[in-house]
Image (spheres, rainbow, N blue to C red):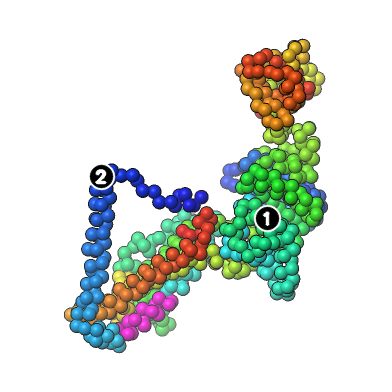
Amino acid sequence: MSIECKGIRKTFGDFVAVNDVSLQVGNGELVALLGPSGSGKTTLLRIIAGLDSADQGQVLFDGEDAAARDLGARGVGFVFQHYALFRHMSVFENIAFGMRVRPRSIRPSERQIRDRVSSLLSLVHLSPLADRLPSELSGGQRQRVALARALAVEPKVLLLDEPFGALDANVRQELRRWLRDLHDQLNVTSVLVTHDQQEALEVADRVVVMNRGKVEQVGTPDQVCDNPATPFVMSFIGSVNVFRGRVERGRAHLGPLTVPYPEHPGAQPEPAAGYVRPHELDVERHGSNDGIWATVKRIKRMGAVVRLELVHGGDVLEVETTRERYDALRPAPGDQLYVRLRTLRVFVGAS
Amino acid sequence: MGNSSMRRTRMRSGPAGRIVRIALTATALLFLFGFVVLPLVAVFAQALSRGVQAWGAAVTDPAALAAVRLTLLTCALAVPLNCIFGIAAAWAVTRFEFRGKNLLVSVIDLPFAISPVVVGMMLISLYGLHGLVGPAMEARGLRVIFALPGVVLATVFVTMPFVARELIPLMEACGHEEEECARLLGAGGWQIFRRVTLPSIKWALLYGVILANARAMGEFGAVSVVSGHIRGVTNTVPLHVEVLYDEFNFQAAFSVASILALLAVGTLAAKSFVSWYSRQRGGNPEDGEIA
C-alpha cells in the first residue's frame, strides 16, 4: 500500500511539531525519517498511524483518505520504541492478540492462530521463548516480539518508531541487517523513524531528513550523502568541517579560503559557509597554492582509517585519511601539514 | 535499574549514631504501643470482661445483627460505586487532556479534606426535609435522609478518593502505549479495557478497594448526621456502638466495637497480602508496575 502525506501540520501549544510536510512512500518501499530529537519525525509517524491527528493536511493510503478508516481497520502495524508489549501476556499471547480481538465472524480458529503465531515466532527466531513473559526477555528479543505482534495482523503498512533506539550497539547492528532482510522477504511498505544516520543510510531505500518540523531533503542514501541539499543535511549526515565567511563579486571568501563562486556575481556581500567532509581533505608534507597549512594536534587511529585533528588559526580541522597514506607521511603532533580540499560545498545564507 | 535504587543502604554510624538510632526506634515503638496496640488490646479486654458468652450475646443481639447487615449492605453498594468512579476518573485524568483536569485532580481529594460532619450537613442541606431537592424527592416517595440512601451517599462521599488515588499514579507511570498498540491491532474499547488495562491495574485496584472498604465500614461522622440513629433500621455498626455506649451498656458496646476492630485487622492483613502478592507477581519493577 502506498502512503501519501499532503501538507501535514501539527502544533502542540506554541510548538510547531510538523510544519507543512508532504511526503510519498511507494508500495513496498522502506523509507527512513531521519532527524534529531524534536524534529517532528515521531509526530509525523504517529499521524500516519492515526494515533495523533493533524491540524491540517491529509494522509492518503492508496490514494484514499486514511482518516475515514477506523484506527484498527487501517492495516497499520506499529512498533513502539519501548516495545509496549502487553506485560501480563506471554510472548505467544502478545503475538496472538491482534487475531484474538477480531469479531467472532472473522476471527481465525484456535488452530489457525496457533499456526500463525508459530510461523511468526520462527520468523523472528523466538520459537523457544513462546511461553515467556516480556519481563523475562532481553531488549532485542522484546523488540522482535513487538515486530512479530505487529506483523500478525498482516498489515499493509509497517511503522517503526526508533525500533532499535534502546538497544546495545552490536544488537542494533544485527537487528538492522535482519530488518532489511525481513523487509526484502515480506515487501511491506515501511516507514522507520530514527535519529541514527548510520541506521537510516544502511536500512532504507530512501531517507527523509527532517529538522524543526520540516523536510530538509528526500533522497536515496547516496543522494543524501553525496549531494546534501542544505547545510543542515550536510552537517547532520556525517561529520563536516565548516568555513564561514561571505560571497561577493563571484568569489567566496571563507576563512582562509577564497574560491570562485560565479552564482553570486553581485557586489552586495552575503553570508555564506563552505562545507567539506573529513575524507575529502588530503594532507601533504609540501605546500602549493591551493590549500592551507595546519598544525597536527591529535591523531586517532581507527582501524583502516586515521583521523587527524589539525589546527589552523583558532579553527580545528578534521581530516580522515587512509592507513597507507598515514604510514607514508608519519605525522606527529606539532608537525605542519599542508591540507588540500578535493571539494567544497558552498551554501549562501546565514546558518 | 530498580534493584540498585531499592537496595537498602545503612549509614555507617559511630557510637553517637547508634544512640540516635536507638532513640528514634524506641520513640516510634513507644508511640505505636501507647497509641495503637494498647487501646486495641483494651477494647478486646473490655469486650471479653464478662466472658465469651456475654460477648456472644451482645454481638448476636438482633439490633447488632441488623447493624452488621446494614454496614455490609452499605459497603456492597458504596465500594462498587467508588470502583466505577475511581476507574473513570483515573482513566480521564491519565489518558485525556482537557480543560479543568487539574481541578478534577484536586477535587478528587476533597473528601479527605472535609470533616465528615460537614459532609453529613451537606447532604442534609441537599436532601433534607428543608433541603434543595429533598422535598421534591420526598413527594415522590424517595426518602434519602434518615434512610439507607443517605447512609450510602455519605459513605460514597467519604470513600471517594481511595480507588482513584491508587490508580492515577500507576496509570500515569504505565503510559498508554500498550492501549494505543491494542487499538491499532484492532481491539475495541471494551476489549482494550478488559484485556490490556484491567490486568495491569488489578492489584492497585484491589488495594484501593480494600482501603475504601475499611473506611466504609468504619465511617462514623457523616453517617451519624444523616442516619437518624433508628435502631435496627439505619444504625450501622459504628453508630450502634455509640448508641450502646450512650445507654451505659459498656460491655455490649465494647463487644460490638471488637467486631469492627477485628474487621479492621482483617482488612490490614488483606492489604498486606495483596501488596506482598502483587510484588511477587509484578516481577518487573523496571516497568513501575507496582506503585
Mark 1 neighbour class, 10 Å CA radius: few under 14, some 14 to 19, many 20 or more: many
The residue identified by callout 1 is: A144
Q: Is residue A160 above or below residue A113?
A: above
Give whichever of A229, A289 is nearer the camera: A289
Q: Is residue A254 above or below residue A120?
A: above
Q: Is residue A258 above or below residue A97?
A: above
Residue B95: % across, % down: 55, 58
Q: Quadrant of the C terminus of chain A?
A: top right
Residue A10: assigned label = none
Mark 2 neighbour class, 10 Å CA radius: few under 14, some 14 to 19, many 20 or more: few
Residue B70 falls inside the magenta stretch: yes
Residue B15: assigned label = 2
Q: Quadrant of residue A238?
A: top right
Give whichever of A202, A69 is nearer the camera: A202
Of the two numbered discs 1 and 2 in the rendering, the one whose residue sits closer to the viewer? 2
Judge from the rendering whether residue A85 lies leftward or rightward of residue A62; answer left or right. Answer: left
Residue A264 falls inside the magenta stretch: no
Q: Main secondary structure of the magenta part?
A: helix
Which chain is mark 2 on? B
Q: Secondary structure at mark 2?
A: helix
User: Is residue A90 visible from the viewing direction of this image?
Assistant: yes
Task: In the displayed orientation, state which residue is furthest to the left.
Answer: B248
Q: Secondary structure at mark 1?
A: helix
Which chain is mark 1 on? A
Instruction: Determine the residue positioned at 27% across, 85% down.
Output: B56
Q: Quadrant of the N terminus of chain A?
A: bottom right
Residue range corresponding to the magenta coloring: B63-77
